[in-house]
Amino acid sequence: QTGYVTLDKGYKNTGATKSAITFLDGEEGILRYRGYSIEELAAKATFLEVAYLLIYGELPTQEQYSKFENSIRRHTIVNEDMRKIFEGFPVNAHPMGVLSSLVSAMSAFYPDSYDGKGEDKTELHILRLLAKLPTIATWSYKKSQGHPVNYPKNSLDYCSNFLHMMFALPVEDYKIDPVVAEALNVLLILHADHEQNCSTSTVRLVGSSQANLYSSISAGISALWGPLHGGANQEVIEMLEAIKADGGDVAKYVDMAKNAKTTGFRLFGFGHRVYKNFDPRAKIIKKAADDVLSKLGVNDPVLEIAKQLEELALNDPYFVQRKLYPNVDFYSGIIYRALGIPTNMFTVMFAIGRLPGWIAQWKEMRETKEPIGRPRQIYVGETLRDFVPMADRK
Ligand code: SDX
């Protein structure tokens, strides 16, 4: 090996870039987007306002916001030929696989000049992604129900339009419940960015080779799908349901997690690479779960199980020593379910929320002209050896 390589598996102690987008303090449990606290943004902003803030660096004026919102509305319709690609998927295809495929396919419908010399259409691609992701996301759900897909309604705001496309049926008027729309707004804001997490680092790495934005975002969606990352929100509900089916014996599952080496079991929704204190998003989501479920009159027994599990784990030395706290995924699924969103769509919801963050990070990487990402390694394989003709191999 030439030069000196320090091995840092999982990049636990490696800073990959400088960024001005999101600030995290894992010890203090602080999260800020462009300097604004997540608590204030979740309480006072709309998701599109936060998307604008992340991507362009400032909260929009009324005029900027109206222009942004109207520009997005002009792109919510998806090319009908993409529906033909979509129709080819089996009905039980996981919505995350469908989403990453169709976002990648957008690079065929909206090509950049492949030689990289044509006009820069990045701003248009950004609007198309923000506009079309919700439309595409709802197709999977409608297909799984055997229902016709809905076209977007541009008279609705971003969250209400998503709910309309998800739940409206041709046979009756669909009324948007403001409680549901507001809960969705808060959840999308809380997922909007999170500095250099696995999927964001993927988006940056793919984009660093000058690959187009759609391909980079599609790669981010695939990375997010993993159960250790965004896929955890689906795993949490399945874990809580298993505990409920098992008589609500949370102590048994905490013990299984403590013996992870033999059981191979982890408490999904617990632990975080950066937060060694409470994930501030989990605090907001836990409180919102109580509020939203009571306002909607939903009594979901797994909420109580989740609280018991949290209580038990937070007082257990195994978790305390390892500073394992509930993360963003621990309570989010309980709210999604109360909003009528099925479990296999939870990670899609995470992707819709994270999209502006991925876009902002990709844009910053390009604007700061970051070099192509290309880590080194420590080679531990065979030393030089001669080729052996097949006839002589044992
Ligand atoms: C997200 O990076 C981000 O910011 C991600 C995210 C974002 O917004 O983008 O915040 C979103 O992905 C949240 C995390 C969702 N994932 C889960 O809930 C899956 C369960 N959590 C773990 O797999 C784990 O905590 C990770 C993946 C989140 C973090 O893994 P690390 O930092 O590599 O920690 P580790 O696996 O080295 O664990 C350290 C120790 C180990 O024990 P020892 O080997 O030291 O004895 O803690 C244990 C682990 O076994 N441990 C757990 C545990 N998480 C870690 N034990 C039981 N249950 C868990 N959940």
Image (spheres, rainbow, N blue to C red):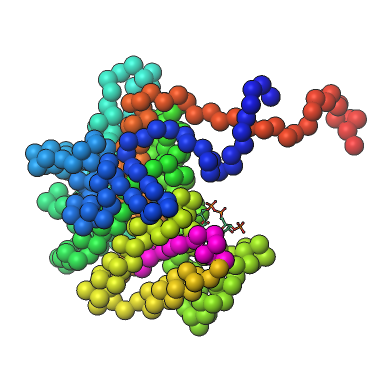
315 lies left or right of 376? left
Number of marks present in the image shown: 0
Query: Looking at the image, which is closer to me, 13 or 79?
Result: 13
Would you say residue 77 is visible in this rendering? no
User: Percent from the top left, x then y, of residue 24?
Assistant: 37, 47
**One can see residue 326 in this view:** yes
**Image quadrant containing the C terminus:** top right
Residue located 24% across and 36% down the image = 57
Q: Give above or below for 225 relative to 78.
A: below
Q: Residue at x 54, y 77 (%)?
A: 251
Q: Which of the 4 image quarters holds residue 116? A: top left
Q: Is residue 42 above or below residue 243?
A: above
Residue 298 x, y percent position in the rendering: 28, 76
Q: Which residues are magenta?
A: 318-334
Name the quarter where the N terminus is drawn.
top right
Residue 52, magenta (yes or no): no
Query: Where is residue 343 drawn, in percent x and y?
Result: 40, 64
Q: Farthest residue toward the left?
A: 63
Determine the residue positioned at 73% across, 35% down: 380
Q: Relative to residue 81, is residue 280 depicted above or below?
A: below
Specify whether 314 is left or right of 180.
right
Q: Nearer the viewer, residue 318 or 390?
A: 318
Q: Picture coordinates of residue 122 (x, y %)?
A: 28, 29
Q: Is residue 324 magenta?
A: yes
